Amino acid sequence: MIITIARNRLRPEHQAEYYALAARMLELCKAMPGFVRRTAFETPDGERIGITEFASEETHRAWQQHPEHQLAIQLGRERFYSEFQIQVCSVVKDYDFQAVS
């Protein structure tokens, strides 16, 4: 599994446009083969963190190279973000726990 952690801060003047594009990107991302899950949240100081999981390097690469996603990345750099950091990670170990009711 490949996990992308995206951290960013939005420029306030483009937030409405950003959220419209982000909704479209989520729709596309979920439709991609190999998509596992996406989680996003904002910290109290305005940092936004998104965690996207894909089943393999190949499926992650396909999302990374999707033409609409490439355009969104470009717009992020040019308009939407005052700062951002992307980390792409391979899962070394994966386990979970669920309490029995």
Image: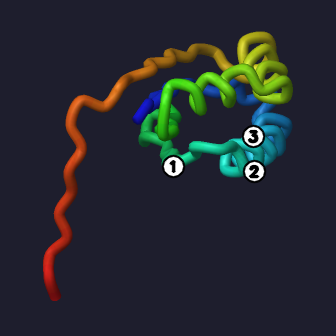
Question: Label 2 crowding class (10 Å Cα cut-off): few <14, some 14-19, many 20+?
Answer: few
- What residue is at 73 percent from the left and 20 percent from the top? 65
Q: Is residue 46 visible?
A: no
Proximity of marks 2 and 3: CB atoms separated by less than 8 Å: yes
| Secondary structure of the residue carrying numbered label 1 | strand
User: Which residue in the protein does label 3 denote?
Assistant: 25
Q: Quadrant of residue 33?
A: top right
For residue 36, the mark is: 1
Q: Quadrant of residue 29?
A: top right
- What residue is at 56 percent from the left and 17 percent from the top? 84
Q: Tell me which numbered mark, 3 or 1, is placed earlier along the sequence.
A: 3
Of residue 89 and residue 34, the one placed in the foreground of this image is: 34
What's the image's color scheme? rainbow
For residue 69, the mark is: none
Total number of numbered labels?
Answer: 3
- What residue is at 51 percent from the left and 38 percent from the top? 54
User: Which residue in the protein does label 2 denote?
Assistant: 27
Proximity of marks 3 and 1: CB atoms separated by less than 8 Å: no
